[in-house]
Image: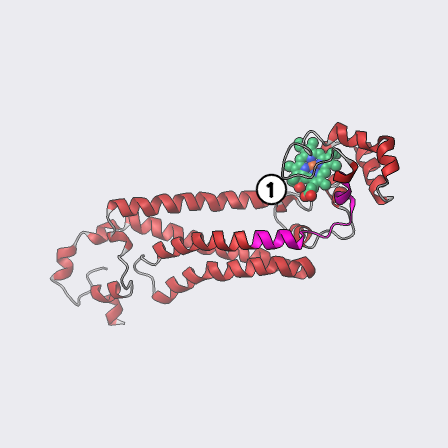
């Protein structure tokens, strides 16, 4: 107990790293720039999730249904049908949407496509679904057909691709956020350790849950927990690091008072 509270004990627990409040100005600016950009990036990622997955069930805001629809699919429906009742609801008048849905439910025949159905898509859909690369193109029958099939969610291909990009990319973010946070002072080492390891664990939980949800929709809850878990841990680390760099800097100044009271509690 005593050892931790003395000046020397406090610096021993930060090991070879320097203490954040004592960092020189260029290093603090480097860390601050990084943390600010990452912080804004995390907020943007949150916004993007709300706008893509969040709209999967047609309502704004992330819910378990959104996650299930994204990974497991909405297996009572085709994508066309669920989108026309969801986020594409405002893109065509009700009669047109009903006609498309009826066409899909009756098997999405080529004859009907040629007999006028294609024109509905031309009129209401291709202004986006032919020019935006991430969207399926609806200019031809072949282009529409996959969206008319039963929706089984993300493909294994896409899942593998997104998983590895996500793991590699985000591990870097958490590494540097944790590295900077490891230099904070005043935390018990185990508290610091838990905060540092949490995002990595939740990142694995998150990615694993996508795969599990692809086959077992009940696991969608893990995706939600994973996302919340690493957002909260990162937010705490980013805010604590920024605070110590800019509002605890007076700690670094009374160097002399620390040296002439060795063994005393000069920090408090
Ligand atoms: C103003 C642009 C725009 C128009 C017009 C539009 N869409 Fe979309 N569509 C989008 C965007 C953006 C997405 C991706 C976001 C989403 O899934 O809500 C999307 C997604 C979809 C998807 C899911 C694609 C996939 O594989 O994930 C379907 C199906 C769809 N739209 C059908 C239609 C139909 C049918 C029409 C015409 C009645 C239409 N859209 C008109 C912009 C548009």
Q: Principal SS element in the magenta part? A: helix
Q: Ligand 1 lies in which image quarter?
A: top right
Position above or below: 144 against 154? above
Specify the quadrant that holds the C terminus.
bottom left
Name the spot of residue 149 as percent of width and height, x first: 78, 47
Residue at the limit of the structure toward the left, as seen here: 260
Q: Is residue 88 visible?
A: no
Q: Residue at x 61, y 57 (%)?
A: 210
Name the spot of residue 56 as percent of width and height, x first: 67, 46
Relative placement, left or right, of 174 versus 105 is: left
Q: Is residue 264 magenta?
A: no
Relative placement, left or right, of 247 versus 209 is: left
Name the spot of residue 104 as percent of width and height, x first: 82, 42
Q: Label 1's element?
A: helix
What residue does disc 1 label?
51
Q: Is residue 29 visible?
A: yes
The part of the image, by quadrant, that contains residue 126 is top right
Q: Which residues are magenta?
A: 144-163
């Amino acid at each position: 107990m005593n050892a931790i509270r003395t000046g020397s004990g406090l610096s021993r627990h930060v090991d070879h790293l320097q203490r954040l409040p004592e960092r020189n100005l260029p290093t603090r600016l480097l860390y601050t720039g990084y943390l600010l950009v990452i912080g804004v990036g995390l907020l943007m990622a949150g916004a993007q999730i709300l706008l893509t997955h969040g709209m999967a069930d047609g309502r704004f805001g992330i819910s378990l249904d959104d996650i299930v629809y994204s990974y497991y699919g909405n297996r009572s429906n085709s994508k066309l049908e669920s989108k026309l009742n969801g986020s594409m609801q405002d893109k065509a008048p009700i009669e047109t949407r009903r006609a498309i849905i009826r066409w899909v439910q009756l098997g999405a025949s080529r004859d009907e496509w040629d007999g006028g159905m294609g024109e509905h898509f031309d009129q209401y859909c291709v202004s986006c679904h032919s020019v935006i690369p991430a969207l399926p193109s609806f200019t031809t029958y072949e282009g529409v057909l996959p969206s008319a099939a039963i929706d089984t969610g993300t493909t294994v291909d896409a899942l593998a691709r997104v998983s590895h990009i996500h793991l590699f990319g985000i591990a870097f973010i958490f590494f540097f956020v944790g590295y900077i946070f490891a230099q904070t002072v005043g935390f018990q080492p185990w508290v610091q350790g838990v905060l540092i390891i949490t995002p990595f664990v939740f990142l694995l939980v998150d990615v694993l849950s996508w795969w599990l949800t692809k086959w077992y929709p009940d696991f969608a809850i893990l995706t939600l927990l994973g996302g919340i878990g690493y957002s909260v841990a990162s937010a705490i680390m980013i805010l604590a690091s920024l605070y110590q760099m800019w509002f605890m800097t007076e700690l670094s100044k009374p160097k002399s008072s620390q040296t002439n009271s060795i063994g005393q509690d000069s920090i408090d």
